[in-house]
Image (tube, coloured by chain):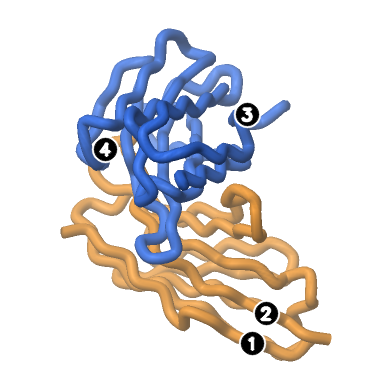
Amino acid sequence: EDQVTQSPEALRLQEGESSSLNCSYTVSGLRGLFWYRQDPGKGPEFLFTLYSAGEEKEKERLKATLTKKESFLHITAPKPEDSATYLCAVQAGQAGTALIFGKGTTLSVSS
Amino acid sequence: DAGVIQSPRHEVTEMGQEVTLRCKPISGHNSLFWYRQTMMRGLELLIYFNNNVPIDDSGMPEDRFSAKMPNASFSTLKIQPSEPRDSAVYFCASSSFRTSGVDTQYFGPGTRLTVL
């Protein structure tokens, strides 16, 4: 069974304190791994897609990496506005199929 | 680009009533997904369509749930009769289906459903 597990469930950081969020997955035929950000009361907002092991993508203070078993979302020198829930999802099998989501990591950054 | 549009944003109803949620996907997208989010189970797929055709409805919990996509710019999710355990946030997402590569799904703002 395809599965996505995110850790930790919650993370509290001080402003400027770098850290990483983990997403481990078991899936047959990975097509892509996605990271989304979700703010309270809003829909998930797309951040990155990673296609193959070794790939990295960056956006401002965020960098996503991918191995054959897991992905990391590295947050460098976070700011309070980075506080949100970060969701990891995989797409497997054929194109156009649905995403399988992890339960997310809720990040809180205090100043 | 208006993004994915969902209505209503909030719905409060009583047990046994019919509820209809609506979604307008991003123009030009031909895949549409309905997800449900709860604290306990996170985001889970209910049903998805490619080119207006339902492909996988294995996530629809019961016969009380039904979904339609009469054209490329509109979809509905109906619950009849509604029950308190249906209370959740329902999201619609759309993507541009391609036979190669990966298609990114873009989410709407969601409909928060409360069944009393």
Of circles 2 and 4, the one toward us is 4
Q: Which residue is mark 2?
A: A108
Residue B25 lies in what quarter of the image?
top right
Give the x, y percent position of residue B104. Answer: 49, 40
Q: Considering only order in the chain, which callout, 4 or 3, is on the residue closer to the N terminus?
A: 3
Tell me the CA gap for discs 3 and 4: 21 Å
Q: Chain of mark 2?
A: A
**Which residue corresponds to the image point at 60% horizontal and 19% vertical from the top-left?**
B27
Q: Are marks 2 and 4 on the same chain?
A: no
Q: Is residue B39 left or right of residue A14?
A: left
Q: Chain of mark 1?
A: A
Q: Which residue is mark 1?
A: A12
Q: Are marks 1 and 2 on the same chain?
A: yes
Q: Residues within 10 Å of mark 4 (few under 14, many from 20)?
A: some
Give the x, y percent position of residue B89. Answer: 50, 47
Q: Which residue is mark 3?
A: B5
Q: Which chain is blue?
A: B
Instruction: Give the position of the C terminus of chain A as an image quadrant.
Output: bottom right
Q: Amino acid at mark 3?
A: Ile
**SS at circle 4:** loop
**Which residue corresponds to the image point at 36% horizontal and 31% vertical from the top-left?**
B79
